[in-house]
Image (cartoon, rainbow, N blue to C red):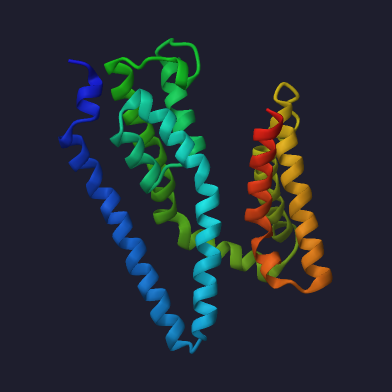
Amino acid sequence: MDFLEIANSPILFGIAAIPVLWATAQAVIYLRMAIKEAKVQKLPKKTIKKVITVTSIFSIIPSLPIVITLAVLTAIMGRFIPWLRLSVMGSPAYESFAAELTLKAFGMEGSLGATQFTPEVFVAAVWVMSTAIMAIPLVTLLLIKSYDKKMKAYKEKGGFMSVATGALMVGLMCTMFIPGMVNFDNPVGILVGAVAFAFAFLFDLIAEKTGAKTLEQFSFPLAMIIGMASAVLFS
């Protein structure tokens, strides 16, 4: 039997749907709780609607890479496992990396879209994608309180550690951003980053000079859209 028959089976759909529906229910519950608390704090309805609109747009536009990754993984791993992984706790970078790492572990070369999974590789990829990322919530559950106390103590005390923690975050962002910006084998990627940065800076500058709060709030998603459009034009 082709493993895709199992990967696309109603049984697997039912299994995958349970955590997806649970995560969806949590989002709805938290949204209702937030709106209820906003009313308790006597925030104007206009402000509440504005916050929901802005955060929705900030959520939708960065989700475009997720849709692209879903399309790639669906073609080689079936419909439901990628849907589950990218809906609950996964990310395009992690899921793609985990799947490619599994391919290499089995001695298979080539990119995800150009390599046909075998049943063994499929099962191994599901395990890698599902178990490795569990370290994040487990570490958070066990260490977040002590970590938060330490961070507050460093912030109050000042000194080297208060600066170092911020520097670590900047370093993390740089490790994610800089490799793409200096990858001269992919000039389109460099162009997209430069265009998005330039327009984000321009929109923020215009908003600061004119007092256009709406432009300030939407500068980041607008810059992302223009950056992606530049990739289409120049690729």
The answer to whether 132 is drawn above or below residue 51 in the figure is: above
Could you tell me which quadrant the C terminus lies in? top right
| Number of residue marks | 0
For residue 82, what is the image quadrant? Answer: top left
The answer to whether 93 is drawn above or below residue 150 in the figure is: above
Which of 158/76 is in front?
Answer: 76
Which of 56/92 is in front?
Answer: 56
Residue 45 screen position, x and y as percent: 49, 83
Horizontal arrangement in the rendering, residue 108 relative to residue 166 (left or right): left
Q: Residue at x 52, y 86 (%)?
A: 44
Horizontal arrangement in the rendering, residue 27 relative to residue 52 (left or right): left
Horizontal arrangement in the rendering, residue 110 relative to residue 226 (left or right): left
Could you tell me which quadrant the N terminus lies in? top left
Q: Residue at x 62, y 54 (%)?
A: 221
Residue 142 screen position, x and y as percent: 40, 54
Is residue 179 visible in the rendered structure shown here? no
Residue 42 screen position, x and y as percent: 48, 89
Q: Residue at x 47, y 58 (%)?
A: 144
Q: Residue at x 36, y 23 (%)?
A: 76
The answer to whether 92 is drawn above or below residue 199 in the figure is: above
Residue 162 screen position, x and y as percent: 70, 61
Please identify the residue farthest to the front as the structure is shown.
233
Is residue 215 visible in the rendered structure shown here? yes
